[in-house]
């Protein structure tokens, strides 16, 4: 027993070099950052690779070899297994199929446009509150006889956002007038209210779209006089 007791006492009285030698604090901090930095660096490489595929897909040739067959983007298909959580991926897919629809004919046009709308919807689910996603979905479905509830859903999403994004008005009115007969009375009132917005070129864009789709007189009758006058009143000849 004494021998074992002395042995324990000897262990307590002696310290290993690892315990006695103190590591300088800056070195320890650097080691911690190095350990933490490895996964961060790997994530950055992973994220950059995904976005490279997304960009290549977004700007790749979208024209189909056969105008009656929808052609997916090989780059975006490669990114799909890794990019399901990134709104930009669905945005790129939506724009790719929207662009490709202009090169197709027949039922392939509807297929590409409906696929585009589906991707814009998924982008909106990941980034709600961004008005360009439901607007782009509305643009896609405005080119064919999409289900009425789908058209109403995208417009209602835009109405609910109550946005002040001036850039949205570049495509808002053309898409709106393309589906005008299918809108509810409240949705039409909202579009007219948007056309009366006093900033930028909003009213001018609204009248350009209205003339293109035959709604100029309707817009003249419903906008406040101070907004409609420059586009509706004929200039008197001197």
Image (cartoon, rainbow, N blue to C red):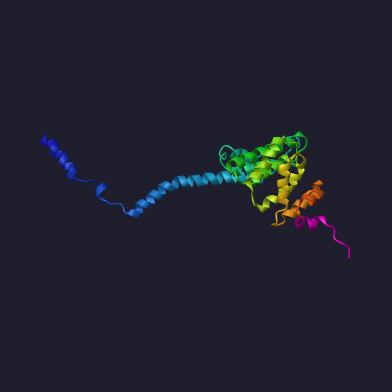
Q: Does the magenta run of residues contain 168?
A: no
The answer to whether 106 is drawn above or below residue 46 in the figure is: above
Q: Quadrant of the N terminus?
A: top left
The x, y position of residue 180, in whole percent, is 76, 42
- Can residue 54 be seen in this snapshot? yes
Q: Residue at x 62, y 40 (%)?
A: 76
Q: Residue at x 48, y 45 (%)?
A: 42
The x, y position of residue 120, in whole percent, is 65, 41
Nearer-the-camera pick, 41 or 140: 140
- Can residue 63 be seen in this snapshot? no
Q: Does the magenta run of residues contain 231?
A: yes
Q: Residue at x 58, y 41 (%)?
A: 126
The x, y position of residue 29, in whole percent, is 37, 52
Q: Residue furthest left?
A: 2
Which image quadrant is residue 11 in? top left
User: 154 left or right of 49?
Assistant: right
User: 3 left or right of 84?
Assistant: left
The x, y position of residue 32, in whole percent, is 38, 49
Q: Quadrant of the C terminus?
A: bottom right
Q: How many marks?
A: 0
- The part of the chain drawn in magenta is 225-238
Q: Residue furthest bottom?
A: 238
């Amino acid at each position: 027993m004494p021998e074992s007791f002395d042995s324990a006492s000897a262990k307590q009285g002696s310290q290993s070099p690892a315990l006695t030698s103190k590591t300088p604090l800056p070195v320890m901090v650097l080691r911690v950052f190095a350990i933490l930095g490895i996964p961060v660096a790997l994530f950055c490489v992973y994220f950059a690779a995904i976005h490279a595929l997304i960009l290549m897909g977004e700007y790749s040739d979208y024209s189909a070899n056969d105008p009656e067959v929808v052609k997916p983007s090989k780059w975006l298909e490669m990114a799909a297994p890794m990019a399901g959580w990134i709104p930009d991926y669905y945005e790129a897919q939506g724009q790719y199929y929207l662009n490709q629809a202009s090169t197709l004919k027949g039922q392939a046009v509807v297929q590409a446009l409906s696929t585009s709308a589906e991707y814009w919807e998924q982008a909106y689910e990941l980034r709600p509150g961004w008005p360009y996603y439901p607007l782009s979905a509305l643009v896609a479905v405005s080119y064919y006889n999409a289900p009425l509830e789908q058209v109403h859903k995208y417009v209602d999403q835009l109405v609910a956002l109550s946005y002040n994004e001036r850039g949205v008005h570049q495509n808002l009115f053309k898409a709106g007038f393309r589906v005008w007969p299918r809108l509810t009375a409240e949705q039409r009132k909202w579009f007219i209210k948007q056309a009366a917005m006093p900033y930028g070129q909003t009213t001018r864009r609204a009248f350009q779209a209205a003339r293109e789709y035959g709604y100029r007189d309707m817009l003249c009758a419903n906008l406040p006089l101070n907004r409609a006058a420059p586009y509706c009143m004929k200039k008197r000849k001197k």
